[in-house]
Image (tube, rainbow, N blue to C red):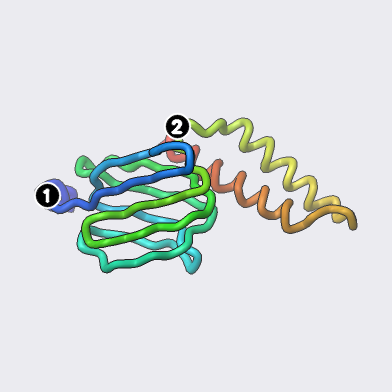
Amino acid sequence: MTDAIKNDARTIQFELLTPEKIVCKEDAIFVALPGVQGELGVLPEHTHLLTSLIWGEVRITGLGNQTKCFAVSGGFVQISPQRVAVLADTAEPASEIDSERAKRAHERAMETLAQKKENVDLASARAALYRAQVRLKVASRLDH
């Protein structure tokens, strides 16, 4: 199947933007996004769509079957048959994620949730835990 993908020149233009910068802009053959109703897969010639994103992993596969991964925090995606434009609050390439810092954040969130104190904001602690889990998952992609 990889030979069939390499021979098929159809691609989709992918752009990942934050308020501060263009994080990634390149042609892709497949894009996976963390949609509000689950993971969304996008191939060239996808129908038009505008939807919200949640904290999660964005994966793009290029022509050489190289996959790049990013941790994103919320935002929106606009999809057309030739383009995927992700407008994220934040976006971190796997290569820029500090795994040790993410592990410490994960541990702090777990400790906060385990304490079950009345003055603890459980929603914030759960959100911190989820963010740390996403960042650890994306960072682990470099180990494969």
* Horizontal and vertical percent position of residue 16: 38, 45
What numbered label is drawn on residue 83?
none
Instruction: Count neighbours of disc 1 (C-alpha within 10 A) and say few if under 14, some if 14 to 19, many if 20 or more.
Output: few
* Residue type at the position of mark 2: Ser
Describe the element under mark 1 as helix, strand or loop: loop
Q: Earlier in the sequence, mark 1 or mark 2?
A: 1
Q: What distance separates the C-alpha of mark 1 from that of mark 2?
A: 28 Å
In which quadrant is the C terminus drawn?
top left
Q: Where's residue 49, x and y in %?
A: 34, 67
Q: Residues within 10 Å of mark 2 (few under 14, many from 20)?
A: some
Q: Secondary structure at mark 2?
A: helix
Q: Are marks 1 and 2 in contact (CB under 8 Å)?
A: no
Q: Position of residue 110 (x, y in %)?
A: 74, 47
Of 144 and 41, the residue lying toward us: 41
- Label 1 is placed on what type of residue? Ala
Q: Residue at x 40, y 57 (%)?
A: 77
Residue at horizontal 84 percent and vertical 53 percent from the top? 120
Residue at image x 68%, y 35%? 104
Residue assigned mark 1: 9
Q: Nearer the viewer, residue 46 or 88?
A: 88
Name the residue located 63 percent from the left edge and 32 percent from the top edge: 101
Does 122 sit above or below residue 102? below
Residue that sits furthest to the left in the current view? 7
Residue 95 numbered mark, or none: 2
Furthest residue to the right? Answer: 118
Expressed as whole percent of the image width and height from the top left, the position of residue 142 reads: 43, 35
Looking at the rendered structure, the number of numbered marks drawn on it comes to 2
Outermost residue to the front: 19
